[in-house]
Image (tube, rainbow, N blue to C red):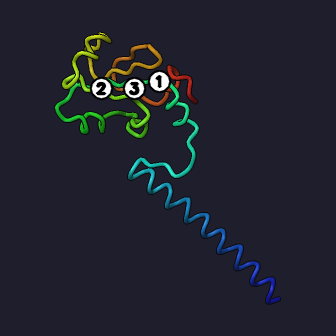
Amino acid sequence: MKRATMILVSILVLLLLVVLFYVISNSITSYTGFVLLDDPYRDCLENKDIKVFINSADSGEAIKKLKLLEYADSFDMYNCLINNEVCTFNNINSFPTFMINGKKIEGNIDKETLSKFSGCF
C-alpha cells in the first residue's frame, strides 16, 4: 500500500507541475509577448515578407495600437515620419498600412485578414 501511495503522490505532483508550467508560460506570454513554446503561426509569419508602415512621433504608441500587436516582432516596421523615402517609394498614404507579400492593405487589420494575405493559418 505504501508503494501505491507514493506512485499516486508522484503522479499528482507531476500533474501539478505541468499545470503550473502552463499557467506561468501563458502569463509570461500575455505580459511580455515572449513565447516559451513553439508557435507555428508565428514561425510562418517570420518566413513571409510582411511590412508595416506607421507615421508617428511615438513609434511605440503607434505599434501598441495595432490589432496584431502580439505578432509585431514578426514584421518589418517602418515609421514614415522618420524614413519618408521608403514610404514614398511604396506609395504609402494612410496609416497603418500593411504590405504582405507585395500586396498593400490599408488600415489596422486583424488576424483573419493577416492569415488570408500571408497564407499562414
Mark in front: 3 vs 2? 2
Quadrant in which the C terminus is drawn: top right
Taking 70 as reference, is 2 left or right? right
Q: Which residue is mark 3?
A: 109
Q: Position of residue 16 (x, y in %)?
A: 61, 70
Q: Is residue 71 above or below residue 11?
A: above
**Image quadrant where residue 86 sits:** top left
Q: Residue at x 66, y 70 (%)?
A: 14
**Image quadrant where residue 77 sits:** top left
Say if mark 3 contacts mark 2, CB within 8 Å. Answer: no
Q: Which residue is mark 1?
A: 113
- Please name the amino acid that badge 2 sits on: Tyr
Label for residue 77? none
Q: Position of residue 38 (x, y in %)?
A: 57, 45
Q: Which residue is mark 2?
A: 78
- Please name the amino acid that badge 1 sits on: Thr
Quote the CA–CA distance across marks 3 and 1. Answer: 6 Å
Of the pair 84 and 106, the residue shown nearer to us: 84
Q: Position of residue 42 (x, y in %)?
A: 51, 37
